[in-house]
Each structure stands twice: as C-alpha cells, then as structure tokens.
Amino acid sequence: NTTGEGLNADQETWVLTWNLAKIGHHYWVVFERIFMDYAHSHAVFVEEDLVFAPDFLALFRSTAWLLEEDDSLWCVSGWNDNGFKTTVRDQCRLQRTSYFPGLGFLLPRKAWLHLRTMWPPAATMGWDYWFRVGFDEMKKECIIPEVSRSHHAGEHGSSINTEKQRQFFR
C-alpha cells in the first residue's frame, strides 16, 4: 500500500516520495494486518522476486515449534548470507544467527509485538534495518539453513541491479 493510509500529511509526503519509505510502509501495513487485524500466531513473508527450493515451506513447518520453545529465537529464514557453494555441505543442518537475514522468513506474532513499538513513523532506512535493530536490542536470533532455500531472481529493484545480481546471486 503506497496510498499513505493511516499517515499524517508529513508521513504521507515521505512515503509517496521515497522508495525505501514506500516499501517500509507496505511492510508495516502487511505486518499489522497479519498480526494485529487477523491475529495470526505466525506467518511466512516473501518478496515477489524470490525463487524457492522445493522444501522451502517444509523448513518452516518443521522448525516453527522452535520459536515457541526457545525465547531467544524470533524467526526462521530460508536464506543464509554465508551459504555460498564453497562454504556449505549439509542440506539438513540448521544454524543460528543474530543478524536478521530476510529473503523469505517465518515470523511469530510475539516478535512483531515488540518490533512495531520501535518502528519509526517515517523511516529513513529499509524495513529490514528496523528488524535488525530490534533483534540486536532484544538479543534475539534467527534459525537459518546451512544451504539457502531461497534466493533473488529479480534483476532490478530498490536495492539490486543487474550487475549486483550477477556478482552475488548467480
């Protein structure tokens, strides 16, 4: 939603002018609808330009219970920032990270209840920056697979271009 729904005039100008603010507001609205309006306990969030491994959803189905059992965990992600072909071996191994990886993730409502309290009304950084700040502030971690289950396929966007895509994701 980039219509400025629920914003004051200054916030609306910011959202309608700056790309990162548009994306951040979109995520805010989605998280609010899923966790506050619909009161879901968990949800999987993806971007439109991600490609998934066949077991992408199975990863979340088989690990969701960890988010309830371990208070130090706030998410499960399908992406491993360090999951390069030369550094990974075990498709079954899970790891922990204190850095919010994004790129297809399962988030529990309890995490959003805290993150929403620190979300700025007119963000100057990406939505995922505020997640990382929240994770760091609360000393929370995320479960990631050793071998990534998602990756970017798009070649253009707010933070990617064709050259970056060639260098990092292919």
Image: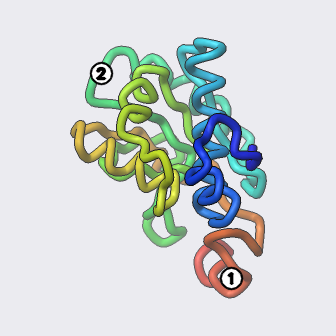
Identity of the residue drawn at 32% across and 40% down: 141
Residues 17 and 125: in front is 17
Q: Circle 1: is it few (<14), some (14-19), or many (20+) Cα within 10 Å?
A: few
Q: Earlier in the sequence, mark 1 or mark 2?
A: 2
Query: What residue did someone put label 2 on?
Result: 70
What residue lies at 48% left-to-right and 24% top-to-bottom?
108
**Residue visible at 32% across and 50% down in the picture:** 133
**Residue at left offset 72%, top offset 54%:** 50
Estimate the x, y position of residue 55 in percent, counting from the top left: 68, 37
Q: Amino acid at mark 1?
A: Arg
Could you say whether the residue bearing mark 1 is in a helix, strand or loop? helix
Asked which quadrant contains residue 168, the reply is bottom right
Q: Is residue 103 visible?
A: no
Q: Using the rendered image of the protein, determine whether residue 101 is visible from the camera's viewpoint.
A: yes
Q: Hey, which residue is sitting farthest front in the picture? A: 9
Q: Nearer the viewer, residue 169 or 140?
A: 140
Q: Which residue is mark 1?
A: 166
**Kind of residue indicated by mark 2:** Asp
Q: Position of residue 16 (x, y in %)?
A: 70, 59
Q: Position of residue 71 (x, y in %)?
A: 28, 22
Q: In which quadrant will I find the N terminus?
A: top right
- The part of the image, by quadrant, that contains residue 6 is top right
Looking at the image, residue 120 sits to the left or right of residue 162; the answer is left
The local crowd at label 2, few if under 14, some if 14 to 19, many if 20 or more residues have their Cα within 10 Å, is: few
The image quadrant of residue 10 is bottom right
CB-based contact (under 8 Å), mark 1 and mark 2: no
Type of colouring:
rainbow
- Residue 114 in percent (x, y) is at 36, 29
Q: Secondary structure at mark 2?
A: loop
Q: How many marks?
A: 2
